[in-house]
Image (cartoon, rainbow, N blue to C red):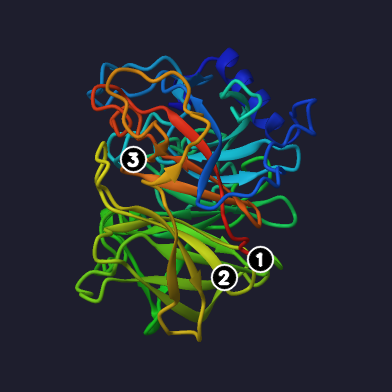
């Protein structure tokens, strides 16, 4: 934790944090998503992966976890893993946000919440190594004491945020460079400066039918402290998971991961939030889960009404699993959004064998490529025909690609046969 860090570690932390938006690769023209080669079915055109055993500067971590898949704590530094949201930078790099760390509120107090800057040298039909470089990171923190409940590093000056404080699952960047992050525990919206300083107190989610009442989860920090207790209506691990932003930058659309408690309709709540007013508008929509799905992974819009939601089941290492990109359209407020399957992530054409060296036990790497992970949580709309998708590898617990090995952080790019816009 923060109070046990030495000066050398702290210096490394804030050097990396300060570089978060300025460090860049000289090869600014290396974006490999501009090819116009046509395809007749969703096709893998680029592949890269960050090895599971990738660590960044910071205190050793994992003291409250048992480890898995041959990887055991204490971990030397901070694992770079569990990407629950990602954004594209102008230089072709990505900002990838780690989730709460090791899977629960209780075991992640020594995992620091960060947004990492990644540069992928995508393996394509003609070039690329498939390697990913971690260039820098932004450390999320609350030095101005805006969080109204106790946090792990609350008695330190910088108040670095940990996975016991929040579970960040979705992220958007505003025109001023600040970040809006959807937290699963509260659920809350969190607003951070470009260099990771919390700018506003956590913003609670109002009940769509009773705006005076908060929607809370069983992991809500006030509820756990028995402060102004509100009966939870959000499922455990069912808070904000995806969050789209309107193309004009005016609205956020945070989306719950699972239906509300006691809701048998299988619908997920999409709320509208006014960025300038920093307030919910009262408008909302519903997304109806497929009967084979258990939750969603991400939500992005490519115009005012149309977008993409990752829909998935809880399976891993199973080529019969349900993992899809769903194209949606926002209809009238308070109604169910229109939906149609865009890409089956278990059946992607792979004519150029882009996965690379196949290890014994790997699945879904052949001419039909699959993304067989339990948690697929990031989709980026690169252009009208190209999507980038990342997995959350749940370090070190997930083994979707290989039943005997911990998952790497894979980044794939898919070419669509028909343009989105």
- 251 sits left or right of 363 in the view: right
Residue 5 versus residue 302 in the image, above or below: above
Name the residue located 64 percent from the left edge and 31 percent from the top edge. 17
Q: Are marks 1 and 2 in contact (CB under 8 Å)?
A: yes
Q: Quick one: label 1 or label 2, which is nearer the N terminus? A: 2
Residue 195 versus residue 406 in the image, above or below: below
Q: Which label was assigned to residue 194? A: none
Residue that label 3 marks: 373
Disc 1 packing (10 Å; few <14; some 14–19; many ≥20):
few
- Count of numbered tags: 3
- Residue 420 placement (x, y as % from top left): 61, 63
Q: Quick one: label 1 or label 3, which is nearer the N terminus? A: 3
Q: Give whichever of 323, 187 is nearer the camera.
A: 323
- Residue 28 placement (x, y as % from top left): 79, 32
- Residue 230 placement (x, y as % from top left): 28, 69
Disc 3 packing (10 Å; few <14; some 14–19; many ≥20):
many
Residue that label 1 marks: 421
Residue that label 2 marks: 306
Name the residue located 29 percent from the left edge and 18 percent from the top edge. 360
């Amino acid at each position: 934790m923060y109070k046990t860090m030495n000066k050398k570690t702290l210096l490394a932390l804030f050097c990396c944090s300060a570089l978060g938006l300025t460090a860049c690769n000289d090869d600014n023209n290396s974006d490999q998503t501009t090819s116009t080669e046509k395809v007749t079915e969703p096709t893998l055109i680029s592949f890269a992966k960050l090895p599971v055993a990738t660590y960044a500067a910071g205190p050793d971590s994992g003291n409250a976890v048992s480890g898995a898949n041959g990887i055991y704590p204490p971990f030397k530094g901070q694992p770079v893993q569990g990407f629950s949201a990602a954004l594209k930078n102008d230089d072709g790099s990505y900002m990838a946000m780690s989730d709460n760390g090791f899977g629960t509120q209780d075991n992640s107090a020594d995992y620091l919440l960060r947004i990492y800057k990644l540069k992928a040298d995508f393996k394509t039909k003609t070039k690329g190594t498939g390697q990913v470089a971690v260039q820098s990171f932004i450390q999320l923190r609350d030095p101005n004491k805006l969080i109204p409940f106790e946090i792990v590093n609350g008695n330190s000056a910088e108040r670095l945020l940990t996975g016991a404080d929040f579970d960040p699952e979705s992220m958007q960047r505003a025109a001023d460079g600040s970040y809006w992050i959807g937290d699963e525990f509260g659920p809350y919206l969190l607003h951070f400066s470009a260099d990771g300083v919390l700018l506003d107190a956590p913003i609670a989610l109002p009940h769509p039918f009773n705006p005076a009442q908060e929607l809370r989860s069983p992991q809500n920090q006030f509820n756990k402290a028995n402060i102004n207790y509100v009966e939870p209506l959000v499922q455990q691990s069912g808070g904000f998971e995806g969050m789209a932003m309107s193309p004009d930058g005016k609205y956020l659309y945070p989306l719950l991961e699972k239906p509300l408690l006691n809701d048998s309709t299988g619908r997920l709540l999409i709320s509208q939030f006014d960025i300038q007013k920093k307030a919910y508008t009262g408008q909302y929509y519903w997304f109806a889960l497929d009967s084979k799905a258990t939750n969603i992974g991400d939500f992005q819009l490519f115009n005012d009404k149309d977008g993409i939601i990752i829909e998935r089941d809880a399976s891993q290492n199973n080529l019969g699993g349900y993992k899809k990109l769903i194209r949606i359209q926002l209809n009238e407020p308070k109604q169910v959004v229109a939906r149609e399957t865009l890409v089956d992530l278990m059946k992607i054409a792979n004519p150029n064998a882009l996965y690379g060296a196949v290890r014994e036990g790997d699945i879904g790497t052949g001419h039909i490529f699959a993304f067989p992970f339990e948690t697929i949580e990031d989709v980026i709309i690169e252009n009208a025909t190209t999507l980038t998708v990342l997995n959350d590898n749940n370090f070190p617990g997930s083994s979707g690609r290989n039943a005997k090995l911990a998952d790497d952080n894979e980044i794939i790019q898919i070419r669509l046969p028909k343009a989105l816009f």
